[in-house]
Each structure stands twice: as C-alpha cells, then as structure tokens.
Amino acid sequence: MSEAATADLKAPPKVSGEKPGVGHMEEFGVNFARFLMRCNAECGELAEYNMGGQQTVLMSGPDAQEAFFKTLDSKLSRAAAYQAMVPVFGEGVIFDAPPDRMKTQLKIQVDALRYQNMKAYASVIAQEVQDWVAEWGDEGEMDFLDEFIQLTLNTACHCLLGADFRYKMTDEFKSLYHDLERGLQAIAFVDPYLQQPIFEARDKARARLQELISGIIAERRANKDTVYGDALETFMSGTYADGSYLSDNEVTGLVIATMFAGHHTSSGTAAWTAVELARNPKATEEVLAEVNALYANGGELTMETLRDLPLLERFIEEVLRIHPPLVLLMRRVIEDVEYKGTLIEAGKTVAISTYGSHRNTDYFPDPEVFDLHRAKPDTLWAYIPFGGGPHKCAGNAFALMQLKSIFAALLPRYEFELVDPPQSYVDDLSAMVLKPGSPCRLRYRRRK
Ligand code: HEM
C-alpha cells in the first residue's frame, strides 16, 4: 500500500506484559490457547503480541476470521508461515514449491480425498476397526490416546500407501515417522536448519522414507494394470500443466504432508470423543439409540449409511468445538493489509485461534459445557475447526467419516467409563496439535 493510503490507518493495539528480549514467548509457552484468549479479551478483534521479535497480530471474531481466511495467498502467505514444514515435506513440495506447482500439488492432494476414493477408504477403515476390536474381550482398561494413535496410523498408511505397505509396516517405518514428527518441535519454527541432533535425525528419516516409497512407486510402474484405490495411486497419476508427472520426491512429500495433516488431528479427536462419551452419558444414550436404529433397519456401515447418523456427527462436532486439534492457524503478511481502519504491515504474522473462537460467548453460550443440541451460530466464521476459505481442510470429509465409522462400530458393542476423576482429563497443548493429556485411561465393558 502507498504511504498516502496508509497515513490515516491505526496500528493494531498491543498486548500488555511484553518482556525484554522474549516478548510474550514465556506466557505463550505456558498455555498458548489461554494466552490468545487473554489477547482477545484485552485488545478486541486485533491484538498484537511479540514472539521473540516476530510481531504477530491475532485476529478474533467472525469478521476478522473471515478476512484471514479469504485474503489471497499473495498477501497473507501460508507457505511463508509454515517454513518449518519444508525439511519434513521435502524441497520443492507444497510450502517450498513455486505457486503454480504448489497449486497443482494441493489439487492432486484434494483429488486423493474426493468422494470416489472415499468409498474404498470407508471399507478399509471399517476393516481396521473390526480387527482392532476383535482383541478386546469382554472388558478391560486402556489408554485410548495411545490406541487411537496406533489405529489412525494404520488407517492412514492403509488408505495412503495401500494394503501391501500397511500389512508389511515395519518398526523401521514407525521410527522414521517418529523422527519426522520430532523434527517439528517449537525450535523448528525459529530455524528448522539449526545444527541439532533432532534435525539430523529428521533429515535422515525423510531420505530413507523416500527410498521406501520410491520402491513401491517402481513396483507399481512395473504393474501398470493393477488398480490400487489408494492415495498413492492418485499422487502417481497426477500431472502438472505441461503433462509431466510428480517426481518421487514430490510424491513422497505429498504422502508425508497428508499423513501429518490427518494423523494426530484424528487420533486426538477420537480420544476426546471417547472421553466425552464416557463423561456425558445422557448424550451418549441418544447417539447410541441412533446407531442401534441403523443396525436394526438392516444397515451396515458404508459411506452412505454413515451419512444417516446426524446425532453422532453433532456429537463429534461438539467435541471439535471444545477441543479443536489445530488451535493456532498462521499466515505471514507479504503485502500491507488494511482491516477496518487498521494497518497490518508486511513482515508481521497474523494468527487466529480456533479454541478462542469456539469459546466466544456471543455464539456459544456456556462454552465449556458439552451440549449435544447446541444451536449452530448464524455465521460460517465462528465455528472453524477445519479452517475456511481456499485452504479449508481437504480431509474434512475423510476425518468425519473415519470418526463416525470408529464410534458407530464401538458404541453398540461397548460402554465406556472414565478411570480417573472427570476433571483430570484436560487438553494437552504441549505439541502443535491439541490432544487429551496422558494418561487418557478408559474402562470398557461389553454391552449386554
Ligand atoms: C479432526 C480432524 C481434522 C481437523 C480438525 C483438521 C483441521 C484442519 C485445518 C484447521 C486446516 C486449515 C489449516 C490452515 O488454514 O492453516 C486443515 C488443512 C488441511 N487438512 Fe485437515 N484436519 C483434520 C483431518 C484431516 C485429515 C484426516 C486429512 C487427510 C487425510 C487432512 C488434510 C488436510 C489438508 C491436505 C489440508 C491443507 C489444505 C490446503 O492447504 O489446501 N486433514 N485441516
């Protein structure tokens, strides 16, 4: 924006409590979801805080959130805000690709999650859940977060890389994936290329994973007529505008990116759903009646019948309202942006908090109460667990289908009970993705 155009604009109000050198980093580190709520309560729609020198403007409320989601990438860049992901996804992949190639890669990723593939995924997930539950017996106790982390890793591998890879999934694969995950600790958002053992392990894991995936790609190219019905097939058949296919590096990057987007978001939500089912017996009875009616009518769990479970869906939506896995979404300001007479200058970061938005009492009265029949807000931009605008979650339908499939299979067979006092099940915000704190123990008993 020209100087004349910006002359009359205000600066965003600054959040109190800044400390020399570190800004608000310490308070942010204690509980960033609560810190962001304080920023909003103190300053309103726009609140500027300081993350060790990186000025960040929190945008709160439906209008500001709509502006955040709808502003073009060329002004508010997602890629620039998520550079920590580049060594994990790979060079030239998504956040490191030139805009045109990034667009094509994202489109191919979306294609892999479209309805035609979803039918195959639904039966894969149903099978995985059945195999998992087969070992449960009549009653028992387990950590549901650990269980769901494993289950959703199995389903993700199966849907992304195919049955062959899934059933041969080695400890090596799990440890590579773990090393990639560890490469995303907070320090990576300061500089992901520092000389650090965790980053060396991350880079080695990325290279080895590419070797493994290149092996499958080569095998598949030699068996051209086989249909696999998984995401890898879609990634391998996608092309750029000039007709060229994605390289093995790019295909590997898309596999990793999809896995990262979908794995912990799904496992954390599944674990919270199990806890909320155990904590809210009345709502659970209603959902159970709906699921039982589906089976009583001779229904089986398919992509279509899962759609006929609106109460179960409402239950999961309410879980996602109270415990949104991606609390903080960010963009880097590339060109000055004006919002309601305030100037947000290039070089700053803008952020929104799904957690804070879902606790806005104008739209969600008694926000900490789990209410299955809560009225939906009259705006699209207050309830945003899957984000919004052009970068809205590409796996939204997949995630809901998977969660419904899991609980429609579990609920009629087992009842759940908390092992620890209800108030001890709290959000853990120590990693990028919100999840229930450990241990997340539940007791289960076969229904009579
Ligand atoms: C409960 C589960 C999930 C939640 C709450 C969730 C949430 C989100 C959110 C908030 C965004 C937007 C990020 C931003 O604007 O910066 C996003 C993007 C994305 N999600 Fe999800 N997600 C979930 C599951 C999944 C799954 C299962 C997959 C894939 C299998 C997936 C794939 C993606 C992809 C590819 C994007 C990027 C879309 C783009 O840039 O165009 N997500 N997700």
Image (tube, helix red, strand yellow):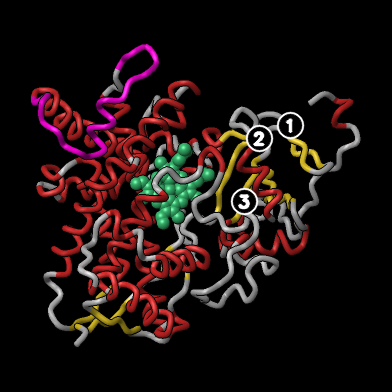
- Residue drawn at point x = 56 percent, y = 64 percent: 31
Q: What percent of the width, then of the height, locates residue 48?
A: 73, 49
CB-based contact (under 8 Å), mark 2 and mark 1: yes
Q: Is residue 236 magenta?
A: yes
In the image, is residue 416 above or below residue 252? below
Q: What percent of the width, then of the height, locates residue 441?
A: 31, 77
Q: Secondary structure at mark 2?
A: strand
What residue is pinned by disc 1? 336
Q: Earlier in the sequence, mark 1 or mark 3?
A: 1
Within 10 angstroms of label 3, few (less than 14), some, or many (20 or more) residues? Answer: many
Pick the front one: 194 or 288: 288
Q: Secondary structure at mark 1?
A: loop
Query: What amino acid is found at the position of numbered circle 1 in the picture?
Result: Asp
Distance from Cα at disc 1 to Cα at disc 3: 18 Å
Q: What percent of the width, then of the height, locates residue 402?
A: 31, 57
Q: What percent of the width, then of the height, locates residue 225?
A: 10, 26
What residue is pinned by disc 3? 352
Pick the front one: 3 or 235: 235
Q: Is 50 displayed left or right of 168 in the figure? A: right
Pick the front one: 330 or 304: 304
In the image, is residue 294 above or below residue 281? above
Of the 4 image quadrants, the one containing the C terminus is bottom left
Residue 106 is tagged as none
Q: Earlier in the sequence, mark 3 or mark 2?
A: 2
Range of magenta residues? 223-244
CB-based contact (under 8 Å), mark 3 and mark 2: no
Within 10 angstroms of label 1, few (less than 14), some, or many (20 or more) residues? Answer: some
In the image, is residue 387 above or below residue 257? below
What residue is pinned by disc 2? 333
